[in-house]
Amino acid sequence: MEEEFLLKFLEIGAIDLKGDDTKLDKLRSTAKDLAAILRKSPSKTASFTMVAADPNIAATDPTVEEAMAALRKQWETVANAFAGRPVSILRATLLDAIVQAARSDDAIAVAFVNTARNALTHTETADEADIWREAVSEIETKVDARAEAEWATPEMITVDPLQYTPPALVSMDYEAPTVDQDELLAKIHSAAGPWGPTDPNKYSPSNNQQAWSQQFANKMSVAIADALDAMAEELAPAPVDLSGPMSTLAKAVTTHIDKVLASFSGATAGLQRRTNLLWWKEALYSPSAHASYLDLPPFEASALMALDLHEQVPTYSPASVSAFLREAIRCLPVEDEGAASGERDLASLVREARTATFMQPFRTLAAKYAPVPVGRGPLLSLIGHPQGSDAVEPTTLRALCGVDASTSMTPSDWGTYLFRELQTARATSNGPTTRAKKK
């Protein structure tokens, strides 16, 4: 039986319903309704997850408002049941709804895992840590199972047999030719002497043997030749048109070869992808910037590495890909950018991402993926829609992305954060790639 995360919040005392099962039923119905909303609008996965993960989320956040509206439909007197807006209850309900939706939709699962990995690093959820760890683990295992199937290289390639049905045999009525014995007899009789009924031999063996034999041979050979020619004419085969069956066979063979090549390509795609990534990591060369990452400042390089890796891997990628990116970024030399530890605060990183020339490809993609920022959402919204402002106020940054402006990040932290947001956005948007749903 699938875990119900609402009950887990009740068990640890994070929400208190005073033992009223009726209220719990209302929350269950609300979670079901929110899950349905999420399935219809998967792009809300990031904001739902970020709000659910933040105990300090503002009660006026648009996602909180949406969750409250869903709760009122099931619990009309909810406003009288609590002194203020029940944010903790709404957060628990949101998490339960997200997990429900993620269990049936792989795209939502990808978005939830990547967003949760980012958000939980910068929120205070110590009391709920085990619940979130269990939720992320369950959905991440599901995502990895699908990703591994797409990335794996099988030991053997199995191809279905050639599908070809030969044409049915054409039945023909056949009657063996025969010699008209009466006609042949008449001709032989005529060749034997002057007594035959058909152009008889005017000589007989008794009166002119030499002339008779010559005439006999002439007439006899013609009689036999005519009989044989008639039989040969009847035995001549009827012409057969093989163009149709041969064309069908050629198409069947072509289709079969295409399937074989497709099977081979699909079976080796995972190996080719892993090989390409290893080459990319060792070369440390940016295909988008046409420059070595080693020649760029580390934070600029890490952002480009996040973009380049995102372009190389599919939406359904194992969790290990983020770890792979982190290790690849750690291969870069850490330069002194004002901090001895090679760290920078989030505010300066966001400002640079919104204005720097090298981030233009990133901003273009972010604008396609994410809408204008309204309430809690991904950094992509801020980066893709700068709206003519170079800087974002610390309070605004905290409200919109859930991370303090003073939060320090290393190049690997920054690159990994951006990569997860890109993977989340692609999985649940109708932008550059089509969202895929598990049937």
Image: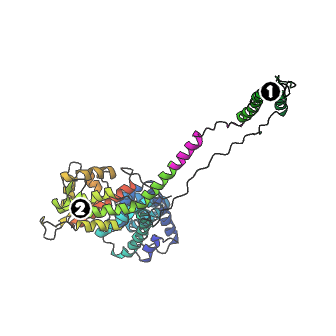
The image shows residue 393, relative to residue 81, as above or below, that is above
Q: Residue furthest right?
A: 195
Magenta stretch, main secondary structure, is: helix
Query: SS class of the residue under badge 1?
Result: helix
Q: Quadrant of residue 297?
A: bottom left
Q: Which of the numbered marks, if any, corresponds to residue 212?
A: 1
What's the residue at 26%, 53% (across, down)? 362
User: How many residues crowd mark 2 within 10 Å: few (<14), some (14–19), many (20+)?
Assistant: few
Q: CA distance from mark 1 to mark 2?
A: 106 Å
- List x then y, in percent, for residue 128: 37, 74
Mark closer to the observer (1, 2): 1
Residue 274 part of the magenta-drawn span:
no
Examine the rendering and report whether any part of residue 436 can be seen: yes
Magenta-tinted stretch: 235-253
Q: Is residue 237 magenta?
A: yes
Name the spot of residue 369 as percent of width and height, x first: 33, 52
Across and down, in percent, residue 269 comes to: 39, 59
Q: Quadrant of residue 191?
A: top right
Q: Within 10 angstroms of label 1, few (less than 14), some, or many (20 or more) residues?
A: many
Side of 354 where 64 appears, left or right: right
The residue carrying mark 2 is: 283
Q: Is residue 377 visible?
A: no
| Left or right of 190 on screen, residue 254 | left
Q: Amino acid at mark 1?
A: Trp
Mark 1 or 2, nearer chain start: 1
